[in-house]
Every structure is written in structure tokens, then in C-alpha cells.
Image: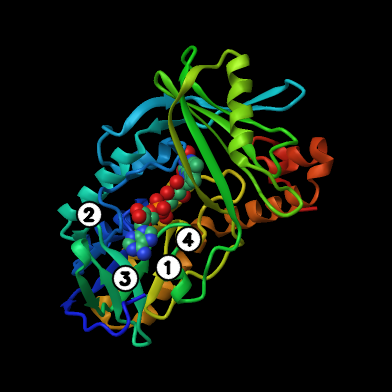
Amino acid sequence: MLPSRTVIAMKTLACDVLVVGLGPAGSSAARAAAHSGADVLAVDRRQAVGVPVQCAEYVPAQLVGQLGLGREYIVQPIAGMRTFLPDGSQTLTRTPGFTIRRDLLDQTLALAAARAGARLMLSTRAKTMAPDRTVILRGKSGGWFRVQPKVIIGADGPRSKVGRWVGAVNRNLLPGVQATLRLAQPLDCTEVYFDPVLYAGYGWCFPKGELANVGLGMRRDAAHPGSVHALLEDFVDRLRRAGKVVGEPVAHAAGWIPAEPVRQAVYGNMVLAGDAAGHTHPITGAGVFAAVSTGEMAGRWAARAAAAGDPDVLAGYEEEWRDLLADTLDRASRRRALMEERWDDFDRVIPSCWVAYRDYYAPAP
Ligand SMILES: Cc1cc2nc3c(=O)[nH]c(=O)nc-3n(C[C@H](O)[C@H](O)[C@H](O)COP(=O)(O)OP(=O)(O)OC[C@H]3O[C@@H](n4cnc5c(N)ncnc54)[C@H](O)[C@@H]3O)c2cc1C
């Protein structure tokens, strides 16, 4: 909120496209919009792009090829994913990818946006929006700014403020918690663990060179209360006993994972992308690929709409992101509903609700 009864000196900033958030979605949007000729201002409340990291840091190989921004952020190649069930059985899925330094990826993307001509402002928070869609920003050292862009892109993550302004909030946020530990020996695959105590979620162990990101993401509700941090400690202990990791955590991370049904992403001259739009996969929790892809699309369509002076052009973004993601996200969202409803029937529900199993891809029952 603006301080009441205070006269504030407010500077006006001009731009065609305002991007709120410089995560993968925002930087990709800013880069694409600037590349398409728009005058772009992109802001993030963080002091440094990508810090702190709130991610298990796995990305599919396809993303690295699509970006074409070097390989500095890559830590190790991943051959596939092993899914472990409580009875000890395991399934290997060949899904090539990489574990990465997510802070470096985010910084690489932001640098690419700046190189394309976008103006980046860090330590700058989108605070409010007036009825005429003027956005009020609060910058470093308490400076206030007013900006009335032709298009606003909300790429401000799972608890998006821009989403709130247009009445499109994520209602199904899952907690994700993580500890980073030393690996006992190198792993060439990501590992995923299902267990009845991890309600409608799973534990992960993603190798990153000599380290591993060990975490869990799951549903928490009135019927399934309790501390996810305590469950994480139990999970880490389990992996220590299994001889996968050793010692004490060297880092911790936590964040929210949207698990949303498919919904609209364009609201007049405002669009949402990435986690802000609920583009995260509701079963796996993966969202970097979707954030980069939908951010890039949003930026491209925003530049076209700004050049035409016509927000109706943004309908092209709604169509394009749906073409890429809607079927996948819709299936995952339905599987999530089933998983939550039938979790008590754990042995039967997991094969139809996890991406490693053929049943997951069968027509919905
Ligand atoms: C524990 C955990 C593990 C995960 N692991 C993986 C994984 O291994 N692989 C994967 O693909 N996905 C993973 N995800 C999901 C992935 O991190 C997200 O999908 C991804 O970060 C989405 O990118 P984004 O740009 O949409 O949002 P974000 O990365 O959240 O970026 C949003 C940005 O907006 C800024 N912002 C927010 N509000 C404002 C405001 N009012 N004004 C200005 N700036 C603002 C924030 O500071 C932030 O920089 C994980 C998530 C969690 C929580």
C-alpha cells in the first residue's frame, strides 16, 4: 500500500511493455519483446536475479537446445529418472536432461534480455495498479514510480500480484522444501520416491555433481496436517540410511508450487506467464521449461500488440500457449485430482497418476 496522507514525489517511466518479475518467464518475455522491437521495462523485487534459488534444478535437454545461451549454467547431464515405490520396486524412464545452477540460468536469461535492449530494474517491486491500469512501482531506497505501459506481463511467480490485480490467483499451492547434501557416490539419474506419508506428492533426490538436491513437494490440508520440514528430515535420514547422501545439509530452499487447472492467461492488456499463470506441471511440479516457453510467447505477442496499439492481438498468446501446454496440463490436473481423492488406495492410484507409468497416459477413467 502507498503510505497514506503523504505527498509522494513519483517519477513517471515510459515503456511499451512492462514485465513484472525476472525469473525464467519474465526474462524470456523481456528478451522476446525487446527483440521484437518493443520498448521494454522489466522489474524484479530481488536485489540479485535468481537468488535465492527455490528449485531442484532439473531441466529437460530440449530447453537447453531451445535457449541457445551457452552451457555455463549446466552442472551435469541426466540420463533419466528412477521412480521408487515403497515395496522397493523401481522404474527407469529415459528422459534426458541436465541439472543446472538455477541462479546462473536465471542470470543468463536476464542478461540476454538486457542485451536485446530491455531495461532491467532490480530491487523494484510492483505495488499497486490504478483502475486505468497505471502500475505503481517502489524502487531502491524507497523511490516511487508510475508507469502506464501498453501491455503488462505478470511473470511474478506462484503468488503473483499481477494475477491478483486481474482476479486470477493460484488457489492450489503445494509447499516444496529442500536440503542440499553431499552424495555418497555420483548418480546419473534423477530419483523420485513415492510414500503414503507424502500425501499427493513425492520426494526427490536430484544429483548435481558431488551434491544432491533432496526435497519433497506434497499437498497439505486440514485432513493432512503436520510439518513438511519434519517429513523432509525423515526423508533425508532415509536417504542417508540407504547410502545415497552423507553428512549435514549445506543449503536449504523452500517455495510454492502451483498445481492449477488450465485457465485463461490474457486479461485485456495484461497477460500472465509461467508460475503466475499456473503453467507449472500439477503432477511433477516442473515449471522452468513452461516458464521460458510461455514467457517467450507472451513477450512476442506483447510487442505485436503494442506496435498495433491493440490489446486484442494478445489473443494470439492465449492460443499459442494453449497449443503447447493445455493438453499436458489438463491431463496432469485431472490426475492430481484423482491422486488426492484416492490416495488411501495408494498402490492402485500411483500407476495412473505418475508420469513414469503407461496408465498415466491412458484416457481418463
Ligand atoms: C522446491 C521447488 C523445486 C522445484 N524444482 C524444479 C525443477 O527441478 N525443475 C523445474 O522445471 N521446476 C522446478 N520448480 C518450479 C520452478 O522453480 C518454477 O516453475 C519456475 O521458477 C517458474 O518461473 P517463473 O519465472 O514463472 O517464476 P519465478 O521463478 O518464481 O520468478 C518470479 C520472479 O518475480 C519476482 N516478483 C514477485 N513478485 C514481484 C513483485 N510484486 N514485483 C517485482 N517482482 C516480483 C520474484 O522476485 C521472482 O524473481 C521447483 C519449485 C520449487 C518451489
The picture places residue 305, in percent across and down from the top left corner, at 31, 76
- Is the CB of mark 1 within 8 Å of ligand 1? yes
Amino acid carrying label 4: it is: Arg
Residue 161: mark in rendering = 1
Residue 113: mark in rendering = 2
- Distance between the Cα atoms at labels 2 and 4? 23 Å
Q: Secondary structure at mark 3?
A: helix
Point out the image quarter for the N terminus.
bottom left
- Distance between the Cα atoms at labels 4 and 1? 6 Å
Q: Nearer the viewer, mark 2 or mark 4?
A: 4
Q: Residues within 10 Å of mark 1 (few under 14, many from 20)?
A: many
Residue located beneath label 3 in the image: 302
Query: Which of 13 and 325 lies nearest the eye of the viewer?
Result: 13
Query: Which of 62 and 106 lies nearest the eye of the viewer?
Result: 106
Q: Residues within 10 Å of mark 2 (few under 14, many from 20)?
A: many
User: How are the colours assigned in the image?
Assistant: rainbow
Q: Secondary structure at mark 1?
A: helix
The picture places residue 58, in percent across and down from the top left corner, at 45, 35
Q: Secondary structure at mark 2?
A: helix
Q: Quadrant of residue 266?
A: bottom left
Residue located beneath label 4 in the image: 159
2 in relation to 324, above or below? below
- Distance between the Cα atoms at labels 2 and 1? 22 Å
- Is the CB of mark 4 within 8 Å of ligand 1? yes
Q: Are marks 4 and 1 in contact (CB under 8 Å)?
A: yes
Q: Quadrant of residue 81?
A: top right
Query: Which of 151 and 252 lies nearest the eye of the viewer?
Result: 252
Q: Earlier in the sequence, mark 1 or mark 3?
A: 1
- Is the CB of mark 2 within 8 Å of ligand 1? no
